[in-house]
Image: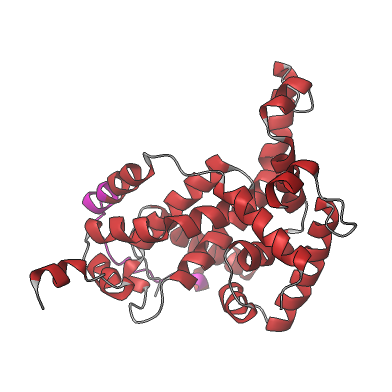
């Protein structure tokens, strides 16, 4: 193999996983560059919070480094990343619902920064905020399936393996999640939000 | 085949998530933390324990055993060491 061809050869995930098991931080960096998009997008879509998504992405790759010895380099890495990302995102959402949201609301109230004030709302693009709210209003189990299917283009079978649920359950959650989302976004009645209509039609 | 509203929803969701990106410092932060954990890994790969459950009364036996097991698991993950309870 010529030097140029050798330089161009893409190192596979399994080779990188082996290097990671040997403690290579360079391998971790390459895996991060290669897969950060899927991890960040998935975490962002499930949590609806960019800051949390960045933290979860950090956590996922740190766990990849820490538990590299338990990963089978012969198997594809992406399902492991999706599984870890959805699990950590689910935990984040549940914890936030249980503990932090009430405190945040009280803090906002004390500071006088109500999130329903015009000043706050003007900061956020209205249409995208509605998309975020529509996704966030889905039950967590439906949300995960919808995100993996629509945002990450995974098949029903792949989602079933990642979430460890039967394909029939994936189909059912996708059906209900899809209907709820279409209704929220005005896609059922053909009344798509004006700004989105401008973007996509 | 995907219908029109499905395809539109896919586009909307993708566009929504693609509007935001992780901070530029994420990679540096990850490699820094990974290096820190590697260099500080506690040189204690196995914890050998043999809980003497027989010496406790039967009413608390399961409780303390379970709590101790959970504590070991949680803390070993937190500090990046492997623990095995025998």
Q: Is residue B42 magenta?
A: yes
Q: Quadrant of residue A63?
A: bottom left
Q: Is residue A143 visible?
A: no
Which residue is rendered at x = 79% and y = 57% of the image?
Answer: A181
A165, B9: nearer the viewer: B9
Q: Main secondary structure of the magenta part?
A: loop
Give the magenta-colored segment's residue range. B35-53
Q: Residue furthest right?
A: A189
Q: Is residue A70 left or right of residue A112?
A: left
B54, A195: nearer the viewer: A195
User: Dividing the image into 4 quarters, which one contains the N terminus of chain B?
Assistant: bottom right
B18, B70: nearer the viewer: B18
Q: Is residue A92 left or right of residue A63?
A: right
Q: Is residue A197 magenta?
A: no
Q: Residue furthest front?
A: A201
State whether residue B13 is above or below residue A17: above
Residue A163: percent from left, percent from top:
61, 72
Which residue is rendered at x = 37% and y = 70% of the image?
Answer: B84
Which residue is rendered at x = 22% and y = 62% of the image?
Answer: A23
State whether residue B63 is above or below residue A119: below
Q: Is residue A87 visible?
A: yes
Q: Is residue A29 left or right of residue A182?
A: left
Residue B62: percent from left, percent from top:
60, 69
């Amino acid at each position: 193999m010529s030097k140029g061809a050798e330089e161009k050869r893409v190192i596979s995930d399994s080779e990188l996983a082996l290097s990671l098991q040997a403690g290579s931080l360079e391998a971790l960096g390459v895996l991060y560059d290669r897969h950060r998009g899927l991890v960040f997008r998935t975490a962002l879509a499930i949590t609806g919070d960019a800051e949390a998504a960045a933290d979860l992405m950090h956590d996922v790759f740190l766990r990849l480094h820490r538990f590299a010895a338990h990963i089978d380099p012969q198997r594809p890495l992406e399902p492991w990343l999706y599984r870890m990302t959805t699990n950590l995102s689910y935990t984040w959402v549940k914890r936030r619902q249980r503990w932090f949201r009430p405190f945040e609301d009280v803090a906002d109230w004390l500071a006088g920064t109500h999130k329903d004030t015009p000043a706050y709302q003007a900061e956020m693009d209205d249409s995208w905020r509605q998309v975020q709210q529509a996704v966030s209003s889905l039950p967590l189990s439906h949300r995960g399936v919808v995100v993996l299917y629509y945002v990450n283009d995974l098949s029903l079978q792949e989602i079933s393996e990642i979430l460890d649920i039967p394909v029939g359950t994936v189909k059912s959650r996708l059906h209900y999640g899809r209907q709820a989302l279409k209704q929220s976004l005005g896609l059922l009645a053909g009344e798509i939000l004006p700004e989105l209509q401008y973007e996509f039609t | 085949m995907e219908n029109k509203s499905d395809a539109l929803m896919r586009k909307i969701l993708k566009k929504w998530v693609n509007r935001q990106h992780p901070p530029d410092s994420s990679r540096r932060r990850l490699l820094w933390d990974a290096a820190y954990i590697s260099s500080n890994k506690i040189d204690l790969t196995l914890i050998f324990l043999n809980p003497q459950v027989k010496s406790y009364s039967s009413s608390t036996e399961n409780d303390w055993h379970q709590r101790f097991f959970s504590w070991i698991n949680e803390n070993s993950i937190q500090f990046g060491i492997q623990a095995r309870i025998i």
